[in-house]
Structures are given as structure tokens and as C-alpha cells.
Image (cartoon, rainbow, N blue to C red):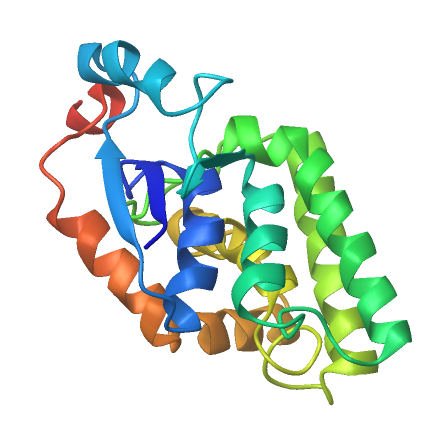
Amino acid sequence: MPTLIIGNKNYSSWSLRPWLLLRHFGIAFDEIVLPLDTPEFFQRIASYSPTARVPALHVDDEVIWDSLAICETVNERWLAGAAWPSDPKARAAARSAVAEMHSGFAALRSQLPMDCRRKPATPHWDAHAERDIARIQQLWQDLRGRFGSGAGFLCGEFGIVDAMFAPVCMRFRGYGPKLGSDAQAYLQTMFALPAMRAWQAAAEAEPVRASAEQA
């Protein structure tokens, strides 16, 4: 059975991605949770991940690090490629969107960090983050319109592209930026997903809180 090493669910956006993919497709796995930015994390993480970061997946004697690499490995080993769209055009678009998410949106990441327990308050982000928010909405609308029949997930069935944008959904719900109707509909689709609800419930039950949240 594979073992996924993750950070605490309330804050670890990168951990959410492969966890959601594994859970949605019913792949059995063990998980080890290391609370972020704690002495326990720094003492133990080097034995699990060569980068000293989460997530990391252990399968037999292999270690796979980086969330996208883990998702690709899961897709190859257990899903026979089903986590990418079967249509070549949709698959290419999904991969482009995933690459953009994986390497971009720095302002959104830094100014709206994931906090699954957060409730919307007065907006505090700048124009750079606002541009990220607008670009993500444009991207979602384009994918759903072209490949998702205008509804549901981004490219038809749930897949890697949806898993990669799951932390953005958490951010949008927690910070409450102004969203168009298409983005709101996509959020509803994602938060109706049983695996997404399971992550949210576990995040809310976690005892560890960051100092900013405690304040």
C-alpha cells in the first residue's frame, strides 16, 4: 500500500492535490501527517522527502516528491491514464492549465494562503492577486465551456486538472473574492465532491493552528 506524507490539512495546499486524487478514485493508501513549521516537522521530514517538503509518496522502495509528479505516478500506476481527458485537445488544454497552476499565480499564493477554516472578511490583497483571480476565472470558464459541456468539472470528468486547482477553490471560499457565476458553479461542483468534503472535515477537526489564526 502506498504511503502519502502530507502537511496538516488546514494549510497544506500542495498536499491536498494528490490526496484528493487518491481518495476520489478509491485508491487505498496510508497517510502520515506532519504539522507544518513545527519541531516535529523539521525533525522528521528529511527521512521522508529528499526536498524536506510535503507531499511525498512512498511506494515500495520508491519515493516520489512534488504534487504533480505524485499525481502523474498515481495516474500511471493505478488509473491507466484516466486522470487526464481522453480527447487529445482536452488533454493538451488540461496539461497547459496544470502547468500554469503549478508554476504561476505567485501573488495569489502569497497573499491568500490556504486556510480551510477561514471565513471571508475584508479583502486585503493587491492588484497583482486580483489579476491572478481574474485569470483563474477566465481559465476555468474556457475549459468548462470547451471541454466540460459548460458544467461540472473543468474537462468533463474529475481529473488531475481539478485536483491541482482544488486549493484555489479553498482559497476562494475562505477569502471571498468577487467571482462570476461560472466560477461559483465550479466551486459548487468541487465542494460537492465527497473527497473534498472529507478533507474539509479533517481540516476543521485538526488541533494545530498557526499563530496568525490563533490571533
Q: Is residue 93 above or below residue 5?
A: below
Residue 176 visible in the displayed image: no
* Residue at the far front in the pictured view: 61
The residue lying toward the viewer, choosing from 102 and 70, is 70
Residue 69, percent from left and from top: 62, 43
The residue lying toward the viewer, choosing from 151 and 30, is 30
Q: Is residue 114 above or below residue 172?
A: above
Left-right relation of 135 to 115: right
The residue lying toward the viewer, choosing from 200 and 83, is 83
Left-right relation of 141 to 160: right
Residue 143 visible in the displayed image: yes
The residue lying toward the viewer, choosing from 19 and 185, is 19
Q: Is residue 114 above or below residue 148?
A: above
Q: Residue at x 78, y 57 (%)?
A: 95
Q: Quadrant of the N terminus?
A: bottom left
Q: Residue at x 11, y 49 (%)?
A: 205
Where residue 99 sits, quadrant-wise, is top right
Q: Is residue 129 above or below residue 72?
A: above
Q: Residue at x 50, y 69 (%)?
A: 187
Left-right relation of 30 to 138: left
Q: Residue at x 17, y 29 (%)?
A: 209
* Residue at the far right in the pictured view: 89
Residue 191, percent from left and from top: 40, 70
Q: Quadrant of the C terminus?
A: top left
Q: How many marks?
A: 0
Residue 169, percent from left and from top: 49, 57
Residue 157, percent from left and from top: 61, 81
Where residue 48 sits, quadrant-wise, is top left
